[in-house]
Image (cartoon, rainbow, N blue to C red):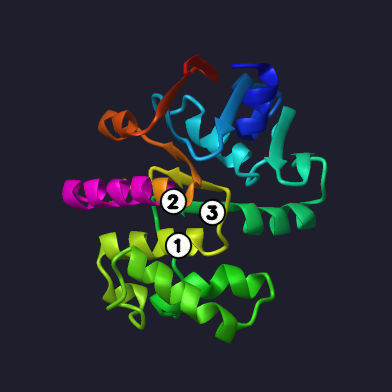
Amino acid sequence: MSEDRVRKNTILEARGVQKAFRKGKLEIPVLKKIDLSVARGESVAIVGASGAGKSTLLHILGTLDEPTGGKVVFHGGDGAREVFSISEEERAVFRNRHMGFVFQFHHLLPEFTALENVLMPGLIAGRQERDMLPEAERLLGEVGLSHRLNHKPSELSGGECQRAAVARALFMRPDILFGDELTGNLDSANSDSLISLLLELNRRHGVSLVVVTHDHDIAKKMSRTVEIRDGQIIHH
């Protein structure tokens, strides 16, 4: 496959990404010149031992954390964009439009219902609630929660909360969905169910899926596995 063809199919690209943390006068490298590309519609598992740098890489790819070196380039319909060359405010708007996130803790707002939580990214973007309700209800139905629209997180099971979080992450129709140990608080049945749901949504909507996991059974279900050791990719 030609380089132009590869680039055309790429949605997100890390080029020489580095990250170091400072502890007093000591600089501790976490990521060491990472090169990684994510194709449109693919599913990628990032695996590695605790402290290898996998969550740090995911947070940088998702623009939640800044690298100390290198670039992250988003290839959208309007061309390539280096996401750390824009302001933090512009990056927040970009992230809300193009990226969705599901973490180990669902981070649903406890005072709002499942439906209201799913609407939240659209409200942040300035859209009118009445215009968004059909889409939010459709998404909650797609993740199996059509009977739980008006329930608050305290009234939902752990698996149901994660499904609501997935619906929220997909609400703005992102190009990429990131998951960071998203099954860490679930039992095996709910974990399997959630991963199956994500892969089905990945196929149905063409959204790229990038997940950090320590579970090799989950990694095997993705179309590609990237292994990080000591801040470097050793297999992809």
Residue at the spot 33% in from the left edge and 63% down from the top edge: 143
Dot 3 amino acid type: Gly
Q: Is residue 205 above or below residue 70?
A: below
* Secondary element at image label 1: loop
Label 2: few (<14), some or many (≥20) within 10 Å? some
Q: Which residues are magenta?
A: 186-202
- Specify whether residue 193 is painted magenta: yes
Residue 207 percent location from the top left of the image: 50, 47
- Specify whether residue 230 is painted magenta: no
* Secondary element at image label 3: strand
Residue 162 in the figure: left or right of residue 81 = left
Q: Which residue is mark 3?
A: 100
Q: CA distance from mark 3 to mark 2?
A: 10 Å
Give whichever of discs 1 and 3 has the lower sequence position.
3
* Secondary element at image label 2: strand
Dot 1 amino acid type: His
For the N terminus, the quadrant is top right
Q: Is residue 78 above or below residue 169?
A: above
Label 1: few (<14), some or many (≥20) within 10 Å? few
Residue 188 percent location from the top left of the image: 18, 46
The residue furthest left is 189
Answer yes or no: do the residues labelled 2 and 1 have beta carbons within 8 Å? yes
Dot 2 amino acid type: Phe
| Circle on res. 107 | 1
Residue 28 percent location from the top left of the image: 62, 23
Residue at the spot 47% in from the left edge and 52% down from the top edge: 205
Eye-nearest disc, 3 or 2: 3
Q: Which residue is mark 2?
A: 103
Residue 4 percent location from the top left of the image: 70, 22
